[in-house]
Image: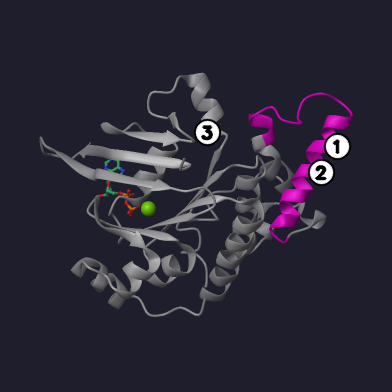
Amino acid sequence: MPLVEVFNLVKSYPVRGRREHKRVVDDVSFSIERGKTLGIVGESGSGKSTIARLLLRLIEPDSGKIHLAGQDLVGASRHQLRLLRRKMQIVFQDPYAALNPRMRIEDIVGEPLLIYREASQAPGGIKEERQARILSALRSVGLDAAALPRYPHEFSGGQRQRINIARALILRPELVILDEPTSALDVSVSAQITHLLRELQRELHLTYVFITHSMPLVRYMADEILVLHRGRVVEHGGWQQICERPASAYTQALLQATPELPV
Ligand SMILES: Nc1ncnc2c1ncn2[C@@H]1O[C@H](COP(=O)(O)OP(=O)(O)O)[C@@H](O)[C@H]1O
Ligand SMILES: [Mg+2]
């Protein structure tokens, strides 16, 4: 059974000053096998982040279904949703905005443990387990104990994105949604982060949704690619097929718009 199955998802928003609604996600379907990466590629405004928010059920679809490990996400009760959400995490584009500047790294990375009441409340040994998990999450992204008492402003953009990834992984999720995780970073730092994400995927058997506007990046990261244009899927298939024999003129234009990256 695929980890994620999405059937005919539709989301529309009212257009300011007009009566009609605009479909920003229009009849989108896909599925993702465990341990694989679905790349979603499209230009700005094509509906990529809206799909991410729908997958996390931060917003409700107008219609359509989302299944996570066979369980219905759209019709889930609050209690079920809490259990399902625990399996999913997201890493956002902007590593500067995503971290609370007043919190120490230890508390930022450990926050999901508190939210889900894991290794958090009881005295004594539990606190040690909590600290061990925070440190292990930091180490998995290439940081160490020196980071624990420090604040976000003391870190570079790439390091901050590593901290975001550590926080996303601390609950050991199955699905990680990466919404343009490197587009605010320099090319060389971006390459380090995408390399790290691939290593983590292999080690932890993670399933990814990798969102980007860059064809070279999606080619590097994804097993299957979904090309999105104005909320609609214009093409969907294996990375080789999409990148080497694109069927749609839109995908061809995207390929021509982006030069090869040294990934
Ligand atoms: N809350 C909202 N209200 C109204 N329109 C929205 C809202 N969220 C997104 N949109 C519109 O939906 C379209 C797709 O947005 P988004 O999913 O953020 O695209 P992308 O991530 O591909 O850049 C855009 O035209 C955007 O303006
Ligand atoms: Mg977006």
- Asked whether residue 36 appears in the rendered view, the answer is yes
**Disc nearer the start of the sequence (2/3):** 3
- Residue 98, how many percent across, how many down? 54, 49
136 w.r.t. 212: above or below? above
Q: Are marks 2 and 1 in contact (CB under 8 Å)?
A: yes
Q: Which of marks 3 and 1 is nearer the N terminus?
A: 3
Q: For mark 2, does the 10 Å Cα neighbourhood hold few (<14), some (14 to 19), or many (20 or more) residues?
A: few
Q: Distance between the residues labelled 3 and 1?
A: 26 Å
In the image, is the residue at mark 3 within 8 Å of ligand 1 by its beta carbon? no
Magenta: main secondary structure equals helix
- From the viewer's side, name the closer residue of 37 and 211: 37
Amino acid found under the numbered disc labelled 3: Arg
| Residue highlighted by disc 3 | 85
Q: Residues within 10 Å of mark 1 (few under 14, many from 20)?
A: few
Q: From the viewer's side, name the closer residue of 70 and 58.
A: 70
Identify the residue under disc 1.
Answer: 128
Percent x, y for residue 233? 25, 53
Q: Is residue 58 visible?
A: no
Give residue 220's position: percent from left, percent from top: 47, 69
Tell me: 149 left or right of 258.
right
User: In the image, what residue type sits under mark 1?
Assistant: Glu
Residue type highlighted by circle 2: Ala
User: What residue is rendered at 58% in x and 65% in y?
Assistant: 193
Mark closer to the observer (3, 1): 3
Q: Give the range drawn in magenta.
A: 113-142
Residue at image point 26% right, 68% down: 251
124 falls in the magenta region: yes
